[in-house]
Amino acid sequence: MLISFTKMQAQGNDFVILNYLDQAIPELDFAALAAAICKRNFGVGADGLVLIKPSLEADARMIIYNSDGSRAEMCGSALRCVSAMLGKRLDKQKLTIFTDAGLKSAVLQDENITVNLGAAQMLRSDYTVAGWQGDLIDIGNPHFVVFVDDLNSDPHLQYGAILEHHPAFATPVNVHFAKVLSPTKLQLKIWEHACGATLACGTGAAATVFAGIHKNLLSDSVDILLPGGQLHIAQDSRDGSMLLTGPVSESFTGIYKWKA
């Protein structure tokens, strides 16, 4: 089977995107496809597979599979990539997209795309797991955020997998180690559930800023320095929604030959 795709990236967080807005969705095992097409060196290579489908509730429906084939609830980077594709196709600057974490909105302005991830929820504050004290936060998916003084030792590579699947959590979590550079600037290193170390994570950046605000370490408007680039997170003072802003780009388009 030949599958047409678009490869996009947001600060190095990359996705294979399948657009089914104008065509019937084939009867495929998309979990198996995700595991195959996302495999680096052997497939297209990506952090996740994203499907764009029609929606009666929004401009489109977004479904995300992690690179191991598991279903992801939400992804801020994928949401911005999909928003860029939809904005170009529909010739719209304001969009709504339905996700497994509910209805999300996006605004396109020049090269930057701002998505509203909704309000974050503090599930456990100052929670000690495997010797690390962090905050467990839900923003459509779960994140464990640890603030440290130094990131040079790459703690996400040493401890990310241990924390991701630790029995202290009801479900696997995304893990983030953060260093506060100033009240308006933060450095972040990431271990994503089902993906491992990634260059960026939009929901993780938002969860980290939320945790920093909760601890009086950060302001409500913060630049995030990620391994793959820079993002901006702001908390809306009206309802607490976390607003994620940054550019995305199309890497290439192609056709993937898959034996289903």
Image: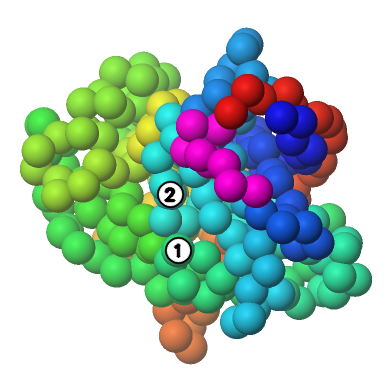
Tell me which segment is drawn in magenta: 26-33
219 vs 6, left or right, is: left
State the image quarter where residue 21 is shown: bottom right
State the image quarter where residue 191 is shown: top left
Query: Do we see residue 37 in this rendering?
Result: yes
Residue 72, label in figure: 2
180 vs 30, left or right, is: left
Identify residue for label 1. Answer: 100
Q: Amino acid at mark 1?
A: Asp
Task: Answer few, some or many: residues within 10 Å of disc 1's Cα (few below 14, many 20 plus, some between 14 and 19).
Answer: some
Q: Amino acid at mark 2?
A: Ala
Q: How is the image coloured?
A: rainbow
Question: Dividing the image into 4 quarters, which one contains the C terminus?
Answer: top right
Marks 2 and 1 in Cβ contact (< 8 Å): yes
Residue 216, label in figure: none
State how far apart marks 2 and 1 are (Cα): 8 Å
244 vs 74, left or right, is: right
Nearest to the observer: residue 113 or residue 84 = 84
Q: Which percent across, then down, holds residue 115?
A: 62, 66
Q: Which percent across, then down, holds residue 183?
A: 46, 56
Nearest to the observer: residue 40 or residue 156 = 40
Nearest to the observer: residue 26 or residue 247 = 26
Which residue shows up at 38% across the image and 33% down it?
Answer: 194
